[in-house]
Amino acid sequence: TRPPATLLFIFGGSGDLNQRKLSPALYNLFLDGWMPEKFAIVGLGRTAYSDEKFRKHLYDGIQEFSRRKGEQNGHWKEFSQHVGYLQMDGEDEAAYSKIADKVKEVEEQFGEHPNVIFYLAVAPQLVPDIAVKLGKLNLCKDTIYTRIVVEKPFGHDLKSAHELNALLTSMFAEDQIYRIDHYLGKETVQNILALRFANALFEPIWNRNYIDHIQITNAETVGVEGRGGYYEQSGALRDMVQNHILQLICMIAMDAPVNFEANEIRNKKVDVLNALRKITRDEVHAYAVRGQYSEGWMKGDKVKGYRQEEKVAPQSPTETFAAIKFYIDNWRWQDVPIYVRTGKHLHDKTTIITVQFKQAPHYAFPPEAAETWRPNRLTISIQPKTDIRLRFQAKRPGQTMTLSPVDMIFNYEDAYDGHEPEAYETLLLDVMEGNPTQFMRADQVESAWKVVMPIIEAWEQRPPVDFPNYSPGSWGPEDAEALIARDGRNWVTLP
Ligand code: BG6
C-alpha cells in the first residue's frame, strides 16, 4: 500500500543533494507506484526560482543522475505537477509563516491533513537554526503527522552530536526525527539481515568458534571532488567510519532480533556499538592507520594530491584513508578482529564484507592433495558488484585427489530481473510510511561517536609526519598492509 497523503518540504531545495539524489529517488518511487496518491513536494531556498524553472532544474538532475531518465511516457510531466518552489531565507524567522500557510493550502487541496516532512538537505551548520525555527511552528508539535529528516554529518564529535541531539529532542519527539545514514537504505546492506536471520544455516556458525576474522573494504576511486571545504573538517574517519562502516559492522555482528520492530532492531545494533572496544589514545597506533593521497595517476589520468585540492590547506593533516582493527568485547565475538579500510583515490570502487572462517579442524587428505587449501570464506559484495559468494574446497575432476577452492555465487543480476531501488528511494519511502527502523536513533549516533573518539583525539594530538603517504590508484599506505599482516592475515580484494 502507498503511504498516506504527504507534503514534503526540502530545505536546500536548489542544492546538490536534492538534484542528484532526492528528486531522482522521489521520481523513481512515483514511476514504481510508491508515491502517495496525494502528495506535494516543495523546494525551499534562497535562490529565486519559478515553479517551472525549479522543475526544469530537477529534470536536468534526473537526466544526469537517475537510474531512469527522461519523460517516461509523460510521467515526468505528471510528477512535476506535484512539485513547487517557495523562496525563503531559512534564517529569517518571519519567513516560516510561509510554511504554515503552505500546509493550510495543501490541506484544503487534499481535503485532509497530510503528513508533513521537513527534509534538511543543507550544510550541517545550518541545521540547528532551522530546527529551532521549525520547532516553534505549531504543526511541529504534532508528533504523529510531522517529521524531520537530518542528513549526516551528525555532529563533528561526541560532544557536538550530543548537543545536536539535545537541541533536536527539545523541539521534536525522537519518533519524529529521522537521521539518515544512506548505507542502511542499500539493498545489499538490508539483505544482510535476511541472509543471517531468514536462514538456519549461518547463524549457528556466526561466532568466535567458527569465524577467524571479518573484513570490510570500502574503497572509492574518486578523490574529494571539489568538496575540500567540507572534507578538511571531516576526513575519512568522520566521513565514512563513524557512520557507514560502523553501521555495516552492526549489521554483520548484531544478535538476532526478536521481531522487526524499529526499536528492537536498533537496540540490537546499539548493543554492538556499546561492545566495540574503546581503545585508549595511547593504543591507537596499534589499531589504526591513516593515509593521505599524493598526486599521481589514476587509469592514465593525472590527479592532484589531496593537499593541492581546492580549499585544502597546503600542509593539511586530514586523512583520506583509514584502516582500523576493531574488536567486539562480548561472548559472540571475543578475540575476532574486524579489519576495516576506506579511502579516496584507491585502486577500485568497491565495498565488500568478508567473513573468513577457521580452518577445518583436521586434514585427512594426502599432503599433495591441496597446494591451495583455503579456509571457507563468505564474501558479501555491497557495491558496485552485488553478489554473495561462499568459497569452499572441491575435488578437481581427475584421477588424483586434488583440492582447490571454488565459489558458490548468488548474483542479484541473475536472480532478479528488476532494477534495485536506490538507497534514497527506500529511505524516503520509509520516512513517508513512518518507519524509522533504518534510521539512526540518538543513542546510536552517540555510541558510534564514542567508538571513534579516541582515534580522532590521538590523531589530532599527533599530526601525521609522513603525509602524503599513498599514491592514487593504490590500496592505501603500506602501514595498512602491515596492520593486518602483523596478525598473519591479508586484505581481500575481489578478482
Ligand atoms: C558519503 C560521503 O556519505 O558517502 C562521501 O560523504 C562518499 O565522501 C559517499 O563518497 C559514498 O557513498 P556511496 O553510496 O557511493 O558508497
Image: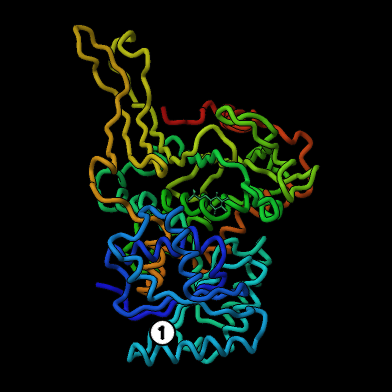
Q: Residues within 10 Å of mark 1 (few under 14, many from 20)?
A: few
- How far across and down, in percent of the image, does residue 36 sit? 31, 75
Residue at 47% x, 66% y is 56
Number of on-image labels: 1
Q: For this view, does 26 lie left or right of residue 282?
A: left
Q: Amino acid at mark 1?
A: Ile
Q: Quadrant of residue 66?
A: bottom left
Q: Position of residue 127 (x, y in %)?
A: 62, 72
Residue that carries the numbered disc 1 in the rendered image: 144
- Foreground pick, 286 / 343: 343
Q: State the image quarter where residue 406 is shown.
A: top left
Indicate the quadrant containing the N terminus: top left, top right, bottom left or bottom right: bottom left
Q: Is residue 374 above or below residue 254?
A: above
Q: Quadrant of residue 5?
A: bottom left
Q: Residue at x 35, y 69 (%)?
A: 77
Residue 42, how many percent across, how many down?
A: 47, 77
| Residue at 25% across, 21% down | 394
Instruction: Please state if 152 lies on the left or on the right of 383 as rendered.
Output: right
* Residue 336 in sight from this viewpoint: no
Q: Tell me residue 373's x, y (percent).
A: 36, 19
Q: Depth check: 71 or 404 in front? A: 71
Lateral position of residue 110 relative to residue 332, left or right? left
Residue lying at 48% horizontally and 41% vertically, measured from the top left? 216
Q: Is residue 70 visible?
A: yes
Quadrant in which the C terminus is drawn: top left
- The secondary structure type at the circle numbered 1 is loop
